Amino acid sequence: MEFDRARRHLAEGAGTAFLVATVVGSGIMAETLADDTAVALLGNTIATGAILVVLITVLGPVSGAHFNPAVTLAFAVRRDLPPAHAVTYMAVQITGGVAGTVAAHLMFEQPLLQLSETARAGPAQWFAEMVATFGLVATILAGLRFRPSAVPWLVGLYISAAYWFTASTSFANPAVTIARCLSDTFSGIRPVDVPAFLLAQAAGALLAALAVRWLLKECAAETRLRQG
């Protein structure tokens, strides 16, 4: 089923809004209920992984369920998405992310827009974001190639794992990063730390697009050789 451009963009904006509302809202809830940071992070992790499965399953058929400018960038580089559509996808994703932060703050009676004071900087954090984004984009592209129906679960499980194996807790999403700098809560990031995160995420997405293209091309060649 084909959906027109307006519906695709609305799905991207709404999906990103729900994703960010879940990340920020579950962070506020977790920090309120748990004195232990590890327990709070676990609550944040479960909610984020779960909502990704839901959102990709229900909105994937409409827009592709990117909800992430890094994913959109990878699709544009692979020429699976026209450049003009990629730019507008990114714009609605960022807008939706900010709306998600505002929605979370409204639900928890917080000031609507804040500036985070949580420092997330340094080479380890930047490298972690590149690794996290590389893994996310590679998971999506390989999943679409081999098991499209499993992509919602693959993404949800990957992000759940990456929360814990990356030093940055796996933002892996420029729209989410920008939105989180507007929340001085558990999931926040200082605005001054955002540009380096965005660069690391873009680098990870581009590297993943190139790496998966090479890997799957090699696999296809070997398959043809065996069949021939």
Image (cartoon, grey):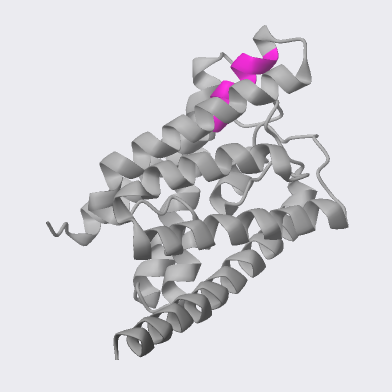
**Residue 93 visible in the current orientation:** yes
Asked whether, in this view, residue 165 is left or right of residue 70, the answer is right
Of residues 218 and 133, the one nearer the viewer is 218
Residue 176 is situated, as x and y percent measured from the top left of the image, at 57, 45
Asked whether, in this view, residue 18 is left or right of residue 214, the answer is left
Q: Residue at x 75, y 53 (%)?
A: 128
**Residue 100 visible in the current orientation:** no
Asked whether, in this view, residue 94 is left or right of residue 14, the answer is right
Residue 29 drawn in magenta? yes
Residue 221 is situated, as x and y percent measured from the top left of the image, at 40, 86
Of residues 219 and 196, the one nearer the viewer is 219
Q: In this view, does 179 lie above or below 110?
A: below
Q: Which residue is drawn at 57% across and 69% down?
A: 208
Magenta stretch secondary structure, dominant: helix
Q: Residue 224: name its quadrant.
A: bottom left
Tell me the quadrant of the picture where the C terminus can be found.
bottom left
Q: Residue at x 69, y 64 (%)?
A: 199
Which residue appears farthest toward the left when viewing the image? 1
Which residue appears farthest toward the right when viewing the image? 122
Of residues 194 and 133, the one nearer the viewer is 133
Q: Is residue 58 above or below residue 187?
A: below
Tell me the quadrant of the picture where the N terminus can be found.
bottom left
> Which contiguous range is marked in magenta?
23-31
Q: Residue 152: name its quadrant.
A: top left
Residue 87 drawn in magenta? no
Q: Residue at x 80, y 51 (%)?
A: 125
Q: In this view, does 209 lie above or below 124?
A: below
